[in-house]
């Protein structure tokens, strides 16, 4: 079994001296508890490092996916193989390209049933090997972005689905 504390069902923030609830996150809390019970454990996510990424395991755990049933660990594919306990590999906004050897490790992981999440900024370019690999899966990377850069349109703290949102003609 897994229990969800009532305090974990709300996004809580401080406004002046008042502590307020700004959003409901009960669905995420219950989903995380259901995954723990049905899958038998948390999801182990390895966050790739060594390519100038904007986030590592600690940052993702603390700011983006806290209390969501993930165990985050850093991994450098330059030196390490993907461990057997990995459920997910996260590539978060690299500034330098992956080597052919690293791409082979990622490809082997995905062919074995592993999941991969790739987050890119609009400024990402020159990632020939990574973009080539993504192209094999039908994912193309190009110019352009549609996003909302106005904090007035967010009820609570916004979660960045894109590593960096920049102002341009589209946004």
Image (cartoon, rainbow, N blue to C red):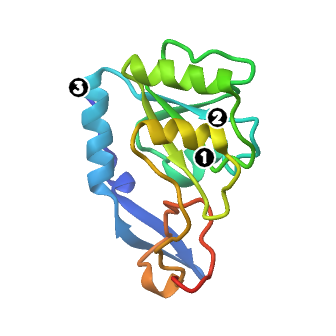
Q: Is residue 112 visible?
A: yes
Task: Answer left or right for 1 relative to 130.
Answer: left
Question: Residue beneath label 3, please?
Answer: 38
Q: Earlier in the sequence, mark 3 or mark 2?
A: 3
Q: Earlier in the sequence, mark 3 or mark 1?
A: 3
Q: Check contact, mark 3 vs mark 2: CB within 8 A.
A: no
Place residue 24 in its image quadrant. Answer: bottom left
Q: Secondary structure at mark 3?
A: helix
Label drawn at residue 27: none
Task: Answer left or right for 4 relative to 171.
Answer: left
User: For this rendering, which residue is in front, 42 or 142?
Assistant: 142
User: For this rendering, which residue is in front, 132 or 153?
Assistant: 132
Q: What is the spatial separation of the Cα atoms under label 3 and label 2, in whole angstroms? A: 27 Å
Q: Secondary structure at mark 2?
A: strand
User: For this rendering, which residue is in front, 46 or 8?
Assistant: 46
Quadrant where the N terminus lies?
Answer: top left
Q: Residue at x 41, y 73 (%)?
A: 22
Question: Residue beneath label 1, please?
Answer: 92
Question: Residue beneath label 2, please?
Answer: 48
User: For this rendering, which residue is in front, 156 or 51?
Assistant: 51
Q: Is residue 144 above or below residue 84?
A: below
Q: Position of residue 86 (x, y in %)?
A: 49, 21
């Amino acid at each position: 079994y897994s229990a969800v504390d009532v305090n974990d069902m709300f996004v809580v923030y401080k406004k002046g001296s008042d502590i307020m609830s700004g959003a409901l996150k009960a669905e995420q809390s219950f989903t995380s508890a259901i995954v723990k019970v049905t899958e038998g454990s948390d999801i182990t996510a390895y966050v790739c490092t060594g390519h100038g990424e904007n986030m590592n395991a600690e940052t993702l755990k603390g700011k983006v996916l806290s209390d969501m049933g993930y165990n985050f660990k850093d991994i450098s594919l330059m030196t390490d193989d993907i461990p057997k306990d990995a459920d997910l590999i996260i590539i978060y906004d690299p500034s330098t390209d992956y080597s052919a050897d690293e791409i082979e490790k990622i490809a082997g992981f995905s062919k074995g049933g592993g999941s991969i999440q790739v987050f890119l900024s609009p400024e990402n370019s020159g990632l020939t090997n990574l973009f080539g690999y993504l192209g094999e899966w039908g994912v193309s990377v190009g110019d352009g972005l549609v996003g909302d850069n106005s904090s007035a349109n967010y009820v609570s703290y916004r979660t960045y689905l894109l590593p960096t949102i920049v102002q341009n003609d589209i946004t």
